[in-house]
Image (tube, helix red, strand yellow):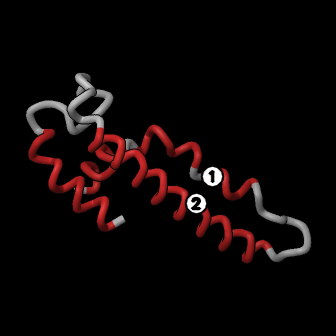
Amino acid sequence: MFSTVLRLTRAKGFAHFIVLPFAALPWRGTSVEQNVLWGVRGAVTAGLLLGYAYLINNIRDRKLDTDAAKNPLVGPDGDALVPFARGLCVAL
């Protein structure tokens, strides 16, 4: 099921953006623990928001995309995954 979530949200497409919150941290004048906490919180938030956006895009574009490699909701398994994808959107 976790692999299905990663496939539906196309995590490989945005994984490199998740570390960006660490670049904006004020490393001087604050403790390392505080910076790590802020960075992890920012990375989790960024991952959830980007996953949600990619998932909404996959649901919306499933009738337009013809390549199953680009959109996992296209193809024979796609129609069965749409209710799961919609539920995942609500969960995120």
Location of mark 1 (residue): 19
Q: Quadrant of the N terminus?
A: bottom left
Residue 75 falls in image quadrant: top left
Task: Specify few, some or many for label 1: CA neighbours under 10 Å numbering under 14, 14-19, or 20 or more.
Answer: some
Q: Work out whether residue 32 or residue 14 is closer to the camera in this orientation and state it.
A: 14
Q: Quadrant of the C terminus?
A: bottom left
From the viewer's perspective, is 17 left or right of 71? Answer: right
Whether residues under marks 1 and 2 lie with C-beta atoms below 8 angstroms apart, the answer is yes
Task: Specify few, some or many for label 2: CA neighbours under 10 Å numbering under 14, 14-19, or 20 or more.
Answer: some
From the viewer's perspective, is 87 left or right of 49? Answer: left
**Lower position in the chain sequence, tag 1 or tag 2:** 1
Q: Amino acid at mark 2?
A: Ala
* Total numbered circles: 2
Give residue 27's position: percent from left, percent from top. Answer: 84, 65
Q: Work out whether residue 85 or residue 26 is closer to the camera in this orientation and state it.
A: 85
What mark, if any, has residue 43 been given in the picture? 2
